[in-house]
Amino acid sequence: MTKITTWNVNGFRASYGKGLRSWVDANQPEILCLQEVKARPDQLREEASGFPGYTAYWNPALRPGYSGVATFVRELPQKIDFGLGEERFDSEGRVIATGYDDFLLLNIYFPNGGRGQERVAYKLDFYARLLEICDRLQRQGREVILTGDFNTAHREIDLANPKQNATTSGFLPEERAWIDAYLSHGFVDAYRMLYPERVQYTWWTFITHARERNIGWRLDYYLVTGGLSARIRDVVIHNDAYGSDHCPVTLVLD
């Protein structure tokens, strides 16, 4: 079995002592994908060691204290790539790709469109650029796993208050349509494949005690190409894990 965990930690340094380190020590995924790390490795002190037994790859944003992703692996990948090959996306530190014999894993922090129409357009352009790359990889015969914070709830079942959020970025029709596009281009939503009717969330706002009331959104996904779908054994949403406004999600593969 291979366990891959994704977690938007909303600040690596803040989350490290608030459950992140102890959770990783207890669960030991083979690959750990973190988003919104908001740090560069040279800023870390106690956290600099990361997690024993793992090799770390960092892709921080140029802007301090913003965005950034990091991937921690127990087995070294055959190939590692950073970004999408387009400066306006890559300056924000949003993608790390780790390649193995049987799959290519992309750890992704999709843009948040909540700061106005310009950022919604940027977010949609990001989805489009990534899908171009995924199409090319599939034409080359690669199996691909996309994981991370997609910053979009796909369907009404994926958030607590769909009607109230119909005009909110994260649930706009044009954002949701991009999830449909990926599913029509050879990907499956691993969680929904296994649990088509289950209601679980992966993000809750810090305000209004939303997590205690379970008023949340499912924003953290595994989109997996069809050749890997038979290997999917489980997708576990660890909603008992704290330390961020998101919780970790684990994909279990044969």
Image (tube, grey):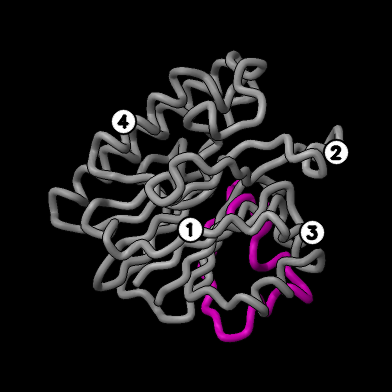
For mark 1, give the secondary structure. strand
Which amino acid is tagged 4? Ala
Which amino acid is tagged 2? His
2 and 1 marks in contact (CB < 8 Å): no
Residue carrying label 1: 235
Residue carrying label 2: 209
Q: Is residue 142 left or right of residue 4?
A: left
N-terminal label among 1 and 3: 3
Q: Is residue 52 magenta?
A: yes
Between the residue at mark 2 and the residue at mark 4, the CA separation in whole angstroms equals 34 Å
Residue at 49% of width from left, 39% of height from top? Answer: 197
Between the residue at mark 4 and the residue at mark 3, the CA separation in whole angstroms equals 35 Å
Between the residue at mark 3 and the residue at mark 2, the CA separation in whole angstroms equals 20 Å
Residue most extreme to the front? 197
Q: Which residue is nearer to you in this view: 110 or 214? A: 214
The x, y position of residue 2, in whole percent, is 41, 74
Quarter of the rendering containing residue 47: bottom right
Q: Is residue 187 left or right of residue 57?
A: left
For mark 3, give the secondary structure. helix
Q: Nearer the observer, disc 4 or disc 3? A: 4
User: Magenta residues?
Assistant: 35-62
Count up the numbered dots.
Answer: 4
Which amino acid is tagged 3? Ala
Which amino acid is tagged 1? Val
Q: Residues within 10 Å of mark 1 (few under 14, many from 20)?
A: many
Residue carrying label 3: 14
Between the residue at mark 1 and the residue at mark 4, the CA separation in whole angstroms equals 22 Å
Residue carrying label 4: 181
Q: Is residue 94 visible?
A: no
Q: Nearer the observer, disc 1 or disc 4? A: 1
